[in-house]
Image: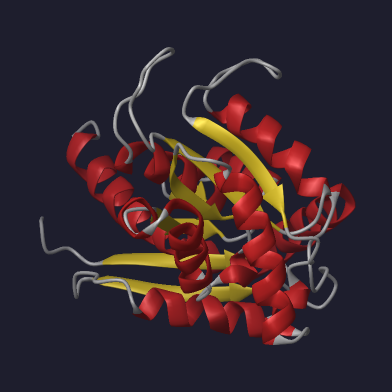
Amino acid sequence: MPGRAISILVVNPNSSHAMTQSMEEAVKTIPLDESVKVYTYTAPPQSPASINDAEGIQLSTDVVLKDLARSGELDKYDGVLVACYSVHPLVDHLAKKYKNKLAVTGIFEASILTSTSVLPLATLGSSSSQSQWGIVTTGAFWEEHLGTGVLEFLGQKTGSENVKFRGVASTGLSAGDFHRVSAEEVKVKLQEATRRLLGDGGVGCVVMGCAGMVGLEEIIRTTAISQYGAESGSSIFVVDGVKAGVLQLEQMVKSRRLFAMK
């Protein structure tokens, strides 16, 4: 039925409650139907407070899978959003384990689909202006990790060309730094990374490639205006993966209900 309730769990696989609270604030700004309820989960203390590399990704996966299996928490929900901006194994693990029960995605995957959907169509050799998207992220580790992850998600070979994807630019900060260092330092680092990503034109969408960047859209927008000029800069989309993920899960749950075998 159209008005049937939808419950979504946003899973923060790191152990930072401050980051979870930032996600909760972001969710409050989404114009959701009253039937959609969003809840949050923070990983136990055994998980890293900030996921900064492959080891952190794997440790957080192990800790969260064990904790969720013990608690049975996922039985309460229709959809799950893995809120770590990475190619996080939890997305695949949960999607396979609960394939007939839960809609599952991650903020990384959701941001790719959102970015490609809001931009104009572009093909190789196309002259479409601002038809590309890219990611501004934290440390240098993520440049290759996310760049390779985008191509794999889109079904392309590593090293191949994607005409719509500009690439990844890192700030040099960790996810936790966005809650620890001064606001001025965060602003400067984010501006520098955004400028590198934007280059001399062509980018129409910038993804905030870290859940810790919640609420920093305006820094990216003003940087785009400074670099591209008022008209082109103000037209850029800035995608928050948490918001994109919640919106997609709402649609995924509805689609699963509508198109499933009766």
Report whether 226 appears left or right of 138: left
Q: Residue at x 70, y 19 (%)?
A: 158
Measured from the top left, where is residue 36 in percent x and y?
27, 69
Nearer-the-camera pick, 77 or 90 = 90
The N terminus is located in which quarter?
bottom left
Measured from the top left, where is residue 113 in percent x and y?
41, 40
Q: Residue at x 44, y 76 (%)?
A: 26
Measured from the top left, where is residue 49 in percent x and y?
80, 74
> Residue 34 appears in which quarter of the rendering?
bottom left
Measured from the top left, where is residue 180 in percent x and y?
77, 85
Nearer-the-camera pick, 226 or 221 = 226
Report whether 49 appears left or right of 249: right
Q: Residue at x 30, y 26 (%)?
A: 121
Look at the picture and state if 43 lies above or below 199.
Answer: below
Nearer-the-camera pick, 3 or 212 = 212
The C terminus is located in which quarter?
top left
Report whether 238 appears left or right of 29: right
Which residue occupies the extreme right position in the image? Answer: 55
Nearer-the-camera pick, 138 or 8 = 138
Q: Is residue 26 visible?
A: yes
